[in-house]
Image (cartoon, rainbow, N blue to C red):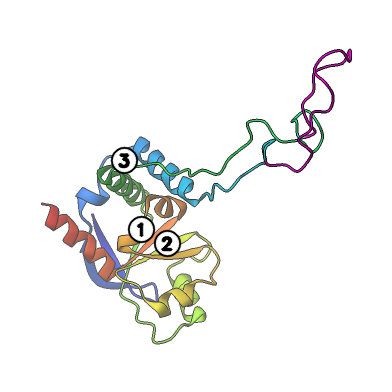
Amino acid sequence: MQLDIINTKGEKTGRTIELPEDIFGIEPNDHVIYLAVKQYQGAQRQGTHKVKTRMEVKGSSKKLHKQKGTGGARKGNLRNPIYKGGGSIFGPKPHKYDIKLNRKVKDLAKMSALSYKAKENNIVVLEDVNLEAPKTKTFTGILKSLNVGRKKTLFVIPEYNDNFYLSLRNVTGVAGTVVNDMNTYDILNANVLVLTESAAKLFSEAAAAEA
């Protein structure tokens, strides 16, 4: 898949880059995408939900009255779940929602998501941007030039850059990540995927290494 490299003014530079078909041109597998998204969302849950059982609520442990001879129902103590303020029965307990996925499954899901973006022509390759200082105004200007100002956008760079992240963190609908940290959910959650030139080259290098 060959794409034009765009400069920060939204103009073609006259250069192109070839994105590997092994990553951006496969037949998407919807099921592994579902599993990867489920794993990501499950990992975001804290799982701290908790209610108190009859052993944990405050109250007397004395039996309210004798078992037989009263003409009434059998009763335990005030912490019985049938009473107001008593413990809960089968309530939630803290636990994790993590699920395990093999590396090959997660890689296939990521490639499937990238292939969907490629099929929909929602990938832009931007020449490398060197921000000398954090500047949100400069970054929003780049977004405007790329005509993605009102779309959810994911910027992918080759390695962490402090100025880059500080420039985009206050821009609504825009997220940034490095190539190695990119996940299936982030790709699908964005309407447009913007790869810097250096980040795009890393995909080609990875495909060449696998060949």
Task: List x then y, in percent, for residue 210.
Answer: 13, 53
Provide the residue span drawn in magenta: 56-78
Answer few, some or many: residues within 10 Å of disc 2's Cα (few below 14, many 20 plus, some between 14 and 19): many
Q: Residue at x 67, y 37 (%)?
A: 53
Q: Which residue is mark 2?
A: 154
Residue at image mark 1? 182
- Of callouts 1 and 3, which one flags the residue occurring earlier in the amino acid sequence? 3
- What amino acid is found at the position of numbered circle 2 in the picture? Leu
> Quick check: 50 above or below 187?
above
Is disc 1 in contact with disc 2, using a CB cutoff of under 8 Å?
yes
Query: Residue placed at 40% from the left, 41% from the top?
Result: 99
User: Are the two marked residues, 1 and 3, in contact with CB atoms closer than 8 angstroms?
Assistant: no
Residue topped by disc 3: 28
Q: Nearer the viewer, residue 37 or 119?
A: 37
What amino acid type should be assigned to the residue bearing mark 3? Answer: Pro
Helix, strand, or loop for circle 2? strand
Q: Residue furthest right?
A: 71
Q: Position of residue 136 (x, y in %)?
A: 51, 79
Residue 31 figure quarter: top left
